[in-house]
Image: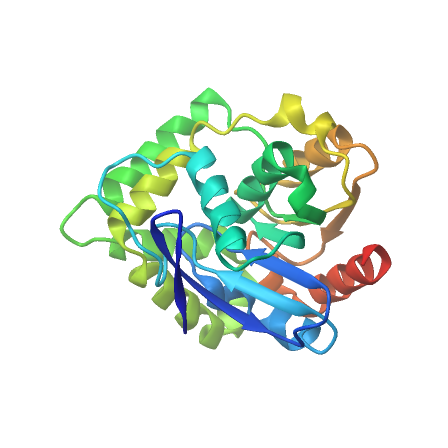
Amino acid sequence: MPTIDAGGLKVHYRFDGPEDAPLVTFSHSLAAHLEMWRGQVEALARNYRLLRYDVRGHGGTDAPDGPYYTLEQLSTDIAALLDALRIERTHFVGLSMGGMIGQLLALREPERLASLVLADTLAVYRPEARTKWQERIDAASGLDGMEPLVEPTLTRWFTAPFKAGRPDVLDEVAAMIRATPPRGFIGCCRALMGLDLIERLPEIRLPVLVMVGREDPTTPVAGAEAIAAAIPGARLIVIEDAAHISNLEQPATFNRALLSFLDEVA
C-alpha cells in the first residue's frame, strides 16, 4: 500500500471506493492501524470514497524518535495528509484516539470537515487517569515491547462473550497491538494523556454523530454523553453488547448507524 510525504512524515494510507463519490476519512485507535476499519470498507465502499491512514507511530507510518508527540501534532499530520493528497474536504470518522484527533481537527480547521463521527472516545482525561497512562508507557518501555499490553488491552476492548466466541478477531487485533512500534505507542500515549477539549466543543458547528459501546470501560457512555451534550445538534447512539472497539464487536449496528448518518449529511 502507498505512502506519501505529509509535512515531513511518511504516512501510510489506502483509498477504496469510487473516485467520484463523497469522501470519508477513517482514523483508528491507539495500538491499531488502518485495517481495523476493514468491516466498514466492505459496507461503505460501493457508495463512498474511503481514505484510511496509519496515525504517526503506527502501522506503516513513520514512528519518529522522541518520547513525546502532541495531539496538535497528530491533528496536523492528518491535515498535511489531506494537503498532500489534494483533498479539500472530507467526512471524518474517528474511534478512540482517532476521535480525539477528529475533535481537534474540527476545532482547528473546521472548513476541512463535512461531518464528524466520534466513536468510543473522550474529550477530556481527568488528572487521576495519568497513573494508568504511565503504567501503559512503563509496560511498553520494557524488553518485551508491546507483549505485556496485549491481554489487558483485549480485555478492555471487547466483552467477555465476544472474546470467547470470536477468537479469529481477537487474534487479528492482538497482532495489530504486537506490531505497534513501542516508541510510537509511547509517543501517542503522551499525546493523549493531557487531552482537555471539553470546554471548546461548543465551537464545533458540524453535523456530528457520537457512538459508544454500552460496556466500554475505557471511554464510557458518560464520556460520550458529555461530548454529545457539548456539541450543538450532536446525536448519540449507544451500541448494545459492545465494549471499546464497537466497530469490530458489533459491525452491523455500527455500519447501519454510520451509513444512515452519512447518507443524510452527504
Instruction: Say how many tags the image has.
Output: 0
Locate the C terminus and report the quarter of the image it occupies.
bottom right
Where does residue 242 sit, x and y in percent of width and height? Answer: 63, 57
Q: For the view shown, which residue lies furthest in the left direction?
A: 143
The front one of 112 and 33 is 112
Question: Could you say which quadrant of the image residue 159 lies in?
Answer: bottom right
Residue 230's place in the image compared with 265, above or below, is above
Question: Could you say which quadrant of the image residue 11 lies in?
Answer: bottom left
Where does residue 95 sit, x and y in percent of width and height? Answer: 57, 51
The front one of 245 and 240 is 245
Residue drawn where x is 26% and y is 50% of the image: 182
Residue drawn where x is 83% and y is 54% of the image: 265
Where does residue 127 sit, x and y in percent of width and height? Answer: 45, 21
Residue drawn where x is 74% and y is 60% of the image: 258
**Relative to 156, 187 lies left or right:** left
**Relative to 47, 218 lies left or right:** left
Question: Could you say which quadrant of the image residue 191 lies in?
Answer: top left
Residue drawn where x is 25% and y is 36% of the image: 67
- Colour option used: rainbow
Where does residue 162 sit, x and y in percent of width and height? Answer: 55, 66
Locate the N terminus and report the quarter of the image it occupies.
bottom left
**Relative to 93, 172 lies left or right:** left
Residue 201's place in the image compared with 258, above or below, is above
